[in-house]
């Protein structure tokens, strides 16, 4: 069995971490026997930092309260109430304006104050940050960058207490998480091809999307 060289938890069939301590023997590549000092430091952070402890506690309570009963949008509202977040921010893609509006209506009906910011707000020219014309989605036309840093700044100025991401592009969502002043969660993960259901590619990786495992990302091969 491989020795520990870094976390590879997906290879584990034991799940000792989810069981009562000392009841299951972890595999040799498990980080728990090796990274004891790190896990102690993490535990101290939960115990000593009130902000982390509160979010962790209310996350667990939200999980238990809605387990296999509540939709994600319901869980977001439950979590927001538990942490005392009355003012919500939505950072959304310009292409998911309608979905963001529906989410806003739901949050308003739930008694929240809601601010929404589109990814194109600020209208910064892609060429200003160094993008070449041929690298645009539509070469020869003006294109504004998606500006998650701007979205985060506007929501911070509005004083939002919990931010919700709706369909930001890969990478743009990373920038938003890096700059969001308030805790942030995801309601919609963008996947234009799969109707914003990216896990479908994982479920069909042995059939229709087997090219993903075969290193043939650009292949148009249709499975038999």
Image: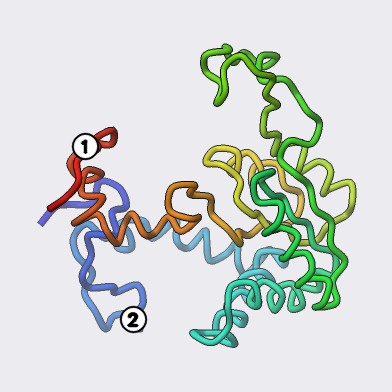
Picture quadrant where residue 169 is located: top right
For residue 149, above or below residue 14: above
Q: Residue at x 43, y 47 (%)?
A: 193
Residue in the picture at 64% in, 72% down: 73
Quick one: quadrant of the N terminus? bottom left
Q: Is residue 30 above or below residue 15?
A: above
* Viewer-side label of 2, 1: 1
Q: SS of the residue at dot 2?
A: loop
Q: Residues within 10 Å of mark 1 (few under 14, many from 20)?
A: few
Mark linked to residue 65: none
- Horizontal side of 189 relative to 15 (left or right) equals right
Residue 15 x, y percent position in the rendering: 28, 73
Q: Which mark is residue 215?
A: 1
Disc 2 + disc 1, Cβ < 8 Å: no
Image quadrant assignment for residue 160: bottom right
Q: Earlier in the sequence, mark 2 or mark 1?
A: 2
Q: Position of residue 149 (x, y in %)?
A: 72, 36
The residue depicted at 20 percent of the width and 70 percent of the height is 13
State the CA–CA distance, disc 2 to disc 1.
Answer: 36 Å
Task: Please tell me which residue lies in front, 216 or 208.
Answer: 208
Q: Is residue 18 left or right of residue 188?
A: left
Label 1: element kind: loop
Q: Position of residue 83 (x, y in %)?
A: 75, 73
Name the residue that disc number 2 marks. 19
Q: Nearer the viewer, residue 75 or 6?
A: 75
Q: Position of residue 24 (x, y in %)?
A: 24, 79
Density class for disc 2 (Cα within 10 Å; few <14, some 14-19, many ≥20) is: few
Q: Vertical placement of 136 versus 31: above or below?
A: above
State the residue lying farthest toward the left.
1
Residue positioned 19% across, 65% down in the render: 27
């Amino acid at each position: 069995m491989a020795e520990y060289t870094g976390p590879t938890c997906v290879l584990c069939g034991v799940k000792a971490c989810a069981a009562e301590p000392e009841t299951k023997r972890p595999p040799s590549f498990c980080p728990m026997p090796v990274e004891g000092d790190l896990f102690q430091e993490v535990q101290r952070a939960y115990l000593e930092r009130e902000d982390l402890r509160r979010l962790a506690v209310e996350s667990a309570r939200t999980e238990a309260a809605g387990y296999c009963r509540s939709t994600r949008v319901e869980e977001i509202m439950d979590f927001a109430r538990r942490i005392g977040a009355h003012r919500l921010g939505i950072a959304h893609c310009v292409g998911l304006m309608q979905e963001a509006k529906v989410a806003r209506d739901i949050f308003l009906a739930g008694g929240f104050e809601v601010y929404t910011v589109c990814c194109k707000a600020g209208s910064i020219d892609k060429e200003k940050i160094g993008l070449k014309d041929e690298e645009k989605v539509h070469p020869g036309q003006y294109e504004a960058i998606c500006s998650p840093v701007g979205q985060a700044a506007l929501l911070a100025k509005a004083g939002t207490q919990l931010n919700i991401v709706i369909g930001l592009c890969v990478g743009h969502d990373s920038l938003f998480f890096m700059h969001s002043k308030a805790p942030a969660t995801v309601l919609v993960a963008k996947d234009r091809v799969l109707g914003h259901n990216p896990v479908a590619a994982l479920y069909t990786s042995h059939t229709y999307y087997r090219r993903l495992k075969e290193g043939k990302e650009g292949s148009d091969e249709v499975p038999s």
